[in-house]
């Protein structure tokens, strides 16, 4: 009887020891290409981990729609936040209540549209945002109770740089640092 109890306890301990490994193996996957990112945005919400491959496969023109309760977390192979660039010709639409993009440095040369209800969160996870010469921002007022619409929110722990020739056109709520040669 004592041997059976020890055998059962040993089996339970081994199974419990394997649980975290099995949970991580099934719950953490990364996308590496534009096509995989589009498919993930269409099929899931929550955090989508992006580890851009050398050939990410950006099309000349395209649209990424980031749904509510979704955040793109850009990582490198060591799972640290990594830099990412959105090229010209690409439009990123942030829907209401989206959680946005998280990366070390985000360079934007494309177009970004965000809802007022999301404007303070969409780029909060970025340590630095670089506004390229071809970047365009817009912010739609989806909440008529708040007539003042900020088009970009720069949190206290973030730096935004507007490159020469670039224009940051919407209103800006500045709690962080805004630098650069652009307007």
Image (spheres, helix red, strand yellow):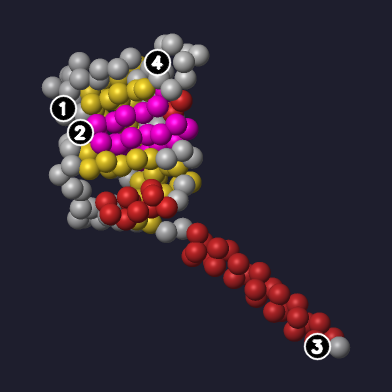
The vertical placement of 171 against 38, above or below, is above
Q: Which residues are magenta?
A: 91-116
N-term mark: 4 or 1:
1
From the image, tell me which residue sits under label 1: 133
Viewer-proximal residue among 131 and 61: 61
Give the quarter of the image for residue 109: top left
- Residue 121 position in % (x across, y down): 44, 30
Q: Quick check: can you spot residue 120?
A: no
Any magenta on residue 173? no
Question: Whole-Å distance between the Cαs marked 4 and 1?
Answer: 23 Å
The residue beneath circle 3 is: 3
Report if residue 102 lies within the magenta region.
yes
Is the C-beta separation of discs 2 and 3 under 8 Å? Answer: no
Circle 3: element type: helix
Spatial CA span between label 2 and label 3: 67 Å
- In the rendering, at what x and y percent does residue 92 appear? 30, 36
């Amino acid at each position: 009887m004592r041997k059976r109890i020890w055998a059962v306890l040993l089996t339970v301990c081994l199974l419990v020891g394997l649980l975290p490994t099995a949970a991580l193996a099934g719950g953490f996957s990364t996308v590496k290409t534009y096509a995989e990112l589009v498919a993930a945005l269409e099929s899931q919400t929550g955090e989508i981990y992006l580890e851009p491959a050398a050939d990410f496969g950006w099309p000349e023109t395209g649209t990424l729609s980031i749904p509510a309760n979704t955040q793109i977390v850009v990582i490198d192979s060591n799972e640290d936040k990594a830099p990412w660039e959105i090229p010209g010709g690409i439009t990123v639409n942030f829907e209401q209540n989206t959680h946005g993009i998280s990366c070390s440095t985000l360079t934007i040369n494309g177009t970004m549209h965000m809802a007022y209800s999301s404007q303070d969160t969409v780029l909060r996870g970025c340590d630095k945002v670089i506004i390229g010469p071809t970047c365009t921002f817009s912010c739609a007022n989806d909440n008529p109770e708040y007539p003042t619409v900020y088009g970009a929110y720069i949190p206290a722990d973030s730096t935004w740089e507007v490159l020469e020739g670039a224009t940051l056109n919407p209103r800006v709520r500045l709690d962080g640092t805004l630098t650069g040669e652009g307007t």
